[in-house]
Image (spheres, rainbow, N blue to C red):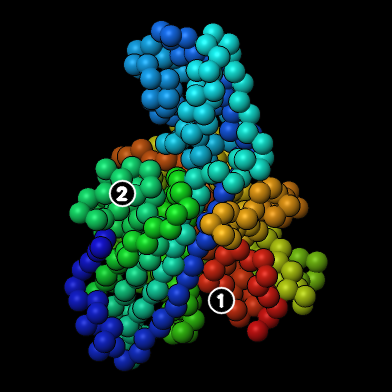
Amino acid sequence: MVGNSSGDARGAIASAARRVEAVYAYPHQNHACMEPMNAVARFTADRCEVWTPTQNGEAALAAASESSGLPASKCEVYKINLGGGFGRRGAVHDWVRQAVAIAKEMPGTPVKLLWSREEDMLHGRFHPVTQCKLTAGLDTSGNITGLHMRISGQSILAGVFPQNIKDGKDPVVFQGLNEGGGEAMIGYSFPNVMIDHAMRNPHVPPGFWRGVNLNQNAIYLECFIDEIAAATNQDPLELRRKLMTKHPTHLAVLNAVAERSGWGKPAPNVDGQKVFRGLAQTHGFGSYVAACAEVSVNAEGELRMHRIVAATDCGHAVNPQQIEAQIEGSFVYGLSAFFGQCTVKNGRIEQANFDTYPVMHMRHMPKVESIVMPSGGFWGGVGEPTIAVAAPAVMNAISAATGKRIRHLPLTGQSLKRA
């Protein structure tokens, strides 16, 4: 299904003087909340009460009503503070259904349900698995004449809200790649472009994972832009600027991180190691975001992430300090994608605890410098959009440092020694 199309991308690529191609992939990932799923439920013949940490009280109420067999007017959900949600405690409340089902067997008795870490990790709603083949046609001067992005993989809506699939199309798949004038807009102008999706849904249940599809789409497009820059001997920032002349708000956040980071000047060495930079930008959840990452890679291929400068234009900024905290927290979550993935064996997720599903430690965390630059006129989000630029900015910096292009996550098992 086509999500964004303008001109004749296939024709432009077929007649191009030169082509650049790459295939990227993004794995299943777990929400890995520090607090496993839990609830307290009490059921009687005419009332059902549930105490649970949730991101979506209405969905929890619906789950309690359906599991108890009572109308929603006879159910009550008390929302309590949660130890991590990231989307897992949003649309699907399977643990609430289970707690109520158990409580129905003991009417009047409060029942506390607490999943073990293994139950939590094995019975999640996982980040969708996708691949993306990107093909760009170039003219003799290295200008992009056509771009085709084919995303193949899982649909979150098909697994969570199938009623929202329209004519076989999941519009959420194209976050950050949509044509201009709406939500999650692509930040570049190409003379010919086609972005489509071949839906392939495995049995692993998908869910909304903080940042949703913006995460992998930003990696696919932003890293490929860097590949084109390298193939045509262009500076990655200058190539983006050429493609963003009609996207001034996207360009403003990109220019802000480039200026703050000192793009174009050598970064200071750290502990005798050269430091390299990488860029990324995107639009999602109503906000414009960009990042510049600084990393070093030693002779053994050990990666150190030193600093990320991040800019956010969310329209209006009511509490800048809270926005900065959201940016920092989203980077912790987004960069954890470098460390872990969920794999399937004999139909079952293999990673049951943090010994096999590692996440970011404090020693891995770079310094984060936030630029909050509201331009007014709209209200955008701050908790989810910035997560998407963390990984591609670092991946582009790794390529600058090593000469190697990282096209799939996690980094585990991939050699980062200089090519």
Q: Is residue 304 left or right of residue 177?
A: right
Q: Position of residue 224 (x, y in %)?
A: 45, 73
The quadrant of the rendering that contains the C terminus is: bottom right
Question: Residue 342 in the image: x percent, y percent?
Answer: 58, 56
Among all residues in the image, which is located at the extreme front? Answer: 105
Q: Which mark is residue 342?
A: none
Classify mark 1: helix, strand or loop.
loop
- Residue that appears at 20% across and 68% down: 6
SS assignment at label 2:
loop
Q: Is 173 in front, or is 342?
A: 342
Q: Is residue 49 above or below residue 67?
A: above
Tag 2 residue: 183
> Callout 2: 10 Å neighbours few (<14), some, many (20+)?
some
Residue 230 visible? The answer is: yes
The residue under label 2 is which amino acid type?
A: Glu
Up-down relation of residue 68 to residue 339 (above or below): above
Question: What label sits on residue 405 in the rendered view?
Answer: 1
Q: In the image, residue 339 lies at what x, y percent?
A: 65, 58
Label 1 crowd (10 A; few <14 / some 14-19 / many >=20): some
- Most extreme residue toward the right is 271
Q: Is residue 252 visible?
A: no
